[in-house]
Amino acid sequence: MPYELYYWDGLQGRGEFIRLALEEAGVEYVDVAREQGTGRGVKAMMKILKSRTEPQLPFAPPFLKDGNLILSHVANILFYLGPKLNLAPKNENLRLIANGLQLTITDFIAEVHDTHHPIATTQYYEDQKGAAKLRAKDFIEHRMPKFLDYFERILHQNPDGKEHAISNTLTYVDLSLFQIFEGLRYAFPRATANLTKDYPALGALHDKVANLPNIQAYLRSDRRLDFNTSGIFRHYPELDQDA
Amino acid sequence: MPYELYYWDGLQGRGEFIRLALEEAGVEYVDVAREQGTGRGVKAMMKILKSRTEPQLPFAPPFLKDGNLILSHVANILFYLGPKLNLAPKNENLRLIANGLQLTITDFIAEVHDTHHPIATTQYYEDQKGAAKLRAKDFIEHRMPKFLDYFERILHQNPDGKEHAISNTLTYVDLSLFQIFEGLRYAFPRATANLTKDYPALGALHDKVANLPNIQAYLRSDRRLDFNTSGIFRHYPELDQDA
């Protein structure tokens, strides 16, 4: 039975980190809300989320169904899929370190989200624009460099070489770092003008991932949606500023 | 060699979720920054965080050292410690479900933090009070009930009984849910006035955990610091409101 990915249609969002792993591995999966039509697919997703009997209840999408197992949270799903997709380190301890890295990526993504929604996810961006401007400024000046410096160090301090975040093989962490680079460039083109110069190892990893045959095919397919202002990474020119 | 927990002195913070597990298990551990004196202990912590050679580099405290292994992120540390401390389900899949629950707790904690720091962690609360008031209002009216409803359902939908979040034994998830109850009551006494009535299963779990002999001893010890306005859960009367 193919993996079933449950996530909103119409945006990359958090689901994209899982899609990239499934696509790179070339395994069969169903992107439920997209493939079954927004109506039927989202209905199937909501049925699980609203279930009053399901013991493996997710708090929110994305979640993954593998047979009878339902797993939620990007990092948890990737921790589970990693070894099956040959996208995790072989060593047990390194897998936990990889999980720690992915959780730092999770935190970073939450901060990216909060640049446009600092007050309330239940309200429109337009209704929290003032606070968003302040938060985005702090993000660009303090948080983004802090996280990117860290990931650049992770590559440099990898004893197996700076081509990968962990171990000497491609892991889901590398794929997620690629996605962060892509997303930041879309959302903040001015602030990220010197990204590759400032973070050369991350830049090289980004290019390497972009050129993996399976990833390349995916990025060119209609399964890869464009970034847009429904996702985590949103381009609002007024939130961007020069590097 | 005892476990070494690295976290800031002077507050419960995110480190508390790990302390509760170590204390309940009754294992030996060193709370480095506290026990070695803030000067020497924090210096040891910063040495790891600032290392230019350490491959297992944490982004931020808390992190755990077990021999040569350094693990960061609360959920990751608890996933690792859980089976060793006999605070995780026996079944492999259930351990992943437990990890998913802990990651929802992580997200909730981040939202609690952002009630007093919605704009910038680098700025004082006093400098973002206006936005904090808005975010706290949304948290109390929308986010807190959404998360607590979810956790209450998790207990009710546990096929092994609503005494535990997962499986039929005490896990680190139960201990974390106890801590959330404690923290919310401290931070938002007005908004949480009916907590036990509104969330009876969570209330019962809270009381059960509070009465575990090891936890009881810990809560009465000077190792349990009081909640204060340096931690995640902060009591600022102006951010509270009636339920």
Image (tube, coloured by chain):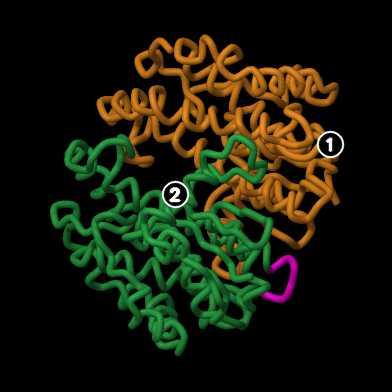
Chain colours: A green, B orange
Q: In this view, which residue lies farthest toward the left?
A: A238
Say which amino acid is labelled 2.
Lys
Q: Residues within 10 Å of mark 1 (few under 14, many from 20)?
A: some
- As measured in the structure, the alpha-carbon distance from the residue carrying label 1 to the one carrying label 2 is 43 Å
Left or right of A163? Residue B94 is: right
Whether the magenta-drawn stretch holds residue A91 is answered as: yes
Asked where in the image residue A220 lies, by quadrant, the reply is bottom left
Residue at the spot of label 1: B25
- Vertical relation: B106 (above or below) A184: above
Residue drawn at (26%, 36%) of the image? A123
Q: Which disc is residue B227 wearing?
A: none
In the foreground, B149 or B47: B149
Please give the chain letter of the residue carrying mark 1.
B
Inspect this view and state whether residue B36 appears: no
Residue at the spot of label 2: A43
Residue drawn at (62%, 82%) of the image? A168
Instruction: Specify the segment rendered in magenta.
Output: A89-94
In the foreground, A82 or A161: A82
